Amino acid sequence: MATERTFSIIKPDATERNLTGAVNAVIEKAGLRIVAQKRILMNRREAETFYAVHKERPFFGELVDFMISAPVVVQVLEGDNAVVKYREIMGATNPESAAEGTIRKLYAKSIGENSVHGSDSQENAKLEIAQFFSGNEIVG
Ligand code: GDP
Ligand code: MG
């Protein structure tokens, strides 16, 4: 299996409840390494750009408001099969459907306030990482 990178966000509902370490404990236990990390307050334009693919969805406004409501932690994760592995340990978008032991099952509050983001493909991982990190901020 190839070593890959994926993009992760610890969302406002999790930073507000002081769950940053708890989320990252699940990530590290799964064998993924955090190779870049920063805590930021996203602005509206950054959040709208990041979630542009969802701009026609009814929840878009709510999603953007949520993502700028409190700090987030943006991270790059590295490991074998990182994109798929991280999606697996995140669990389903709706925590009610998420498998036992996944981050969303453990910590998410609702389908909207669901604690974490993870890239859904290697191509999107590259684009999302580039939105928040320059090359010299990623140290594997
Ligand atoms: P993900 O890839 O599992 O994060 O899910 P999506 O790409 O489908 O959606 C992006 C994000 O939009 C989700 O993680 C949620 O924060 C939010 N979202 C998705 N569906 C809904 C919904 O039905 N209602 C609300 N309020 N938010 C949603
Ligand atoms: Mg998605």
Image (tube, rainbow, N blue to C red):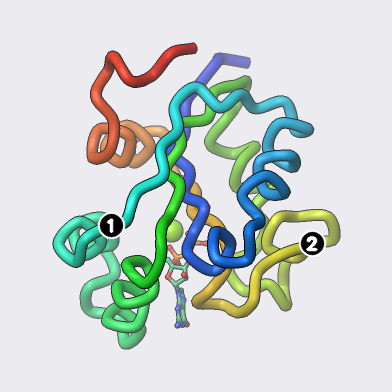
**Which residue is at the far left?**
45
Whether 54 is drawn above or below 100: the answer is below
Place of residue 97 in the rendered image (x, y in percent of width and height, measured from the top left): 72, 73
Q: Nearer the viewer, residue 137 or 128?
A: 137
Amino acid of disc 1: Met
Whether 112 is drawn above or below 78: the answer is below
Amino acid of disc 2: Ala
Which residue is at 33% across, 20% downward?
A: 137
Q: Residues within 10 Å of mark 2 (few under 14, many from 20)?
A: some
Q: Report helix, strand or loop for mark 2.
A: loop
Which residue is at 55% across, 15% downward?
A: 3
Q: Nearer the viewer, residue 57 or 26?
A: 26
Q: Earlier in the sequence, mark 1 or mark 2?
A: 1
Per the model, the C-alpha gap separating discs 1 and 2 is: 29 Å
Place of residue 2 in the rendered image (x, y in percent of width and height, measured from the top left): 56, 14
Give the residue at mark 2.
Answer: 99
Q: How many labels were placed on the picture?
A: 2
